[in-house]
Image (cartoon, rainbow, N blue to C red):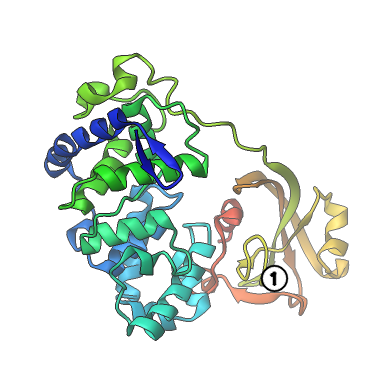
Amino acid sequence: MYKEGKCAFKTADLERLRSVNAPLLAWYHANARMLPWRENPRPYRVWVSEIMLQQTRIEAVKPYFDRFMAELPDIADLAFVEDDRLMKLWEGLGYYNRARNLKKAAEQIVMEYGGSMPPHYHQLVKLPGIGSYTAGAIASIAFGEAVPAVDGNVLRVLSRVLASREDILKQSTKKKIEGMLTETMPGQDAGSFNQGIMELGETVCVPNGKPRCEECPLQCLCLASQRGLTDEIPIKMPPKKRRYEERTVCILEYEEQVGIRKREAAGLLASLYELPNVEGHLKPEQLAEAFGLDPESVVSCEALPEAKHVFSHVEWHMKGYRIRMGKELPKAYIAAKKEELKTIYPLPNAFGRYTKLIK
């Protein structure tokens, strides 16, 4: 039995994980997908890509990454970008605090490290928005430091290799895997090792559907595969149920203008622009009062399709209306030109069903 701090690791588990190194690296070097951040793995590019890839699919990230790099090619550009412009570049990726923390970290890097990414895990993990996984990914991929980067893919793959029945949603399980990998991962080519496990989890030992065990370079080492347990492992306790909220959303138009608002600086979708919306599902006759409109100025009111948006802890069920006004929009709203919604004002994906209806 090997002890790491308060954790105790079985010697057999450590030996099994050491046996993973060679076949995994060989498989990765032969099968790694060509991705923009891999082709040019500068620390800044690795960092931005890792933040974008949190809760977002690789194919969805690619165009956002290219656009972001074209406009903000280095850390200083990110540190000094205007907030609205940053949110516009991030529009569609969701989880906007990721972008806010990117800028905060860039400002800190400019002040404390002269604009160059610090090269060590213990420095990176202290920056805003960078946890143990992201710090490990940057340190290993961009700087070659032999530290693990444990995400959901890694937890799934290694839980199956070890036939572990520990809940992978628990922080203690992640810490245990990090500790074991610290002892067993190769000292050289650590970046390829970390990317290899992630790649294997994304393409072979997949999160949804049956794992492609016959294509896996670790099949002969995988206890879950050998014991027919891949349908049971990994173990994930069901998350808490989301709460449901009913909302009414309004596309408020006057000529070529659309009424929008800026949200509060704290809370859900903080500081982003939004289409006017209120709690509850309202009837047409309730709209003027709810949105502060003069009923005499309402030219038409059109019901729009219902929509749903899922956040991590809450789910919005929305009814929508298009209201056309015969005079200028109330002062409570920003009268944005329709073209400006594409170039200036970032509107979150939560309203995507309705922003697509603005012609």
| Figure label count | 1
85 lies above or below 164: below
Quarter the C terminus occupies: bottom right
Q: Position of residue 227 (x, y in %)?
A: 33, 14
Please state if 357 lies on the left or on the right of 114 as rendered.
Answer: right
Secondary structure at badge 1 equals: loop
Question: Which residue is rendered at x = 69% and y = 70% of the image?
Answer: 264
Q: Position of residue 182 (x, y in %)?
A: 30, 48
349 lies above or below 101: above
| Residue situated in front as seen by the camera: 177 or 248 | 177
Q: What's the amino acid at mark 1? A: Glu
Please state if 107 lies on the left or on the right of 254 as rendered.
Answer: left
Q: Residues within 10 Å of mark 1 (few under 14, many from 20)?
A: few
Q: Quadrant of residue 300?
A: bottom right
270 lies above or below 178: below
Quarter the N terminus occupies: top left
| Residue situated in front as seen by the camera: 12 or 199 | 12
Q: Position of residue 57 (x, y in %)?
A: 39, 47
| Viewer can see residue 342 | no
Q: Position of residue 188 (x, y in %)?
A: 15, 53
| Residue situated in front as seen by the camera: 214 or 337 | 214
| Viewer can see residue 339 | yes
**Disc 1 marks which residue?**
264
Question: Which residue is rendered at x = 75% and y = 68% of the image?
Answer: 325
Question: Which residue is rendered at x = 83% and y = 52% of the image?
Answer: 284
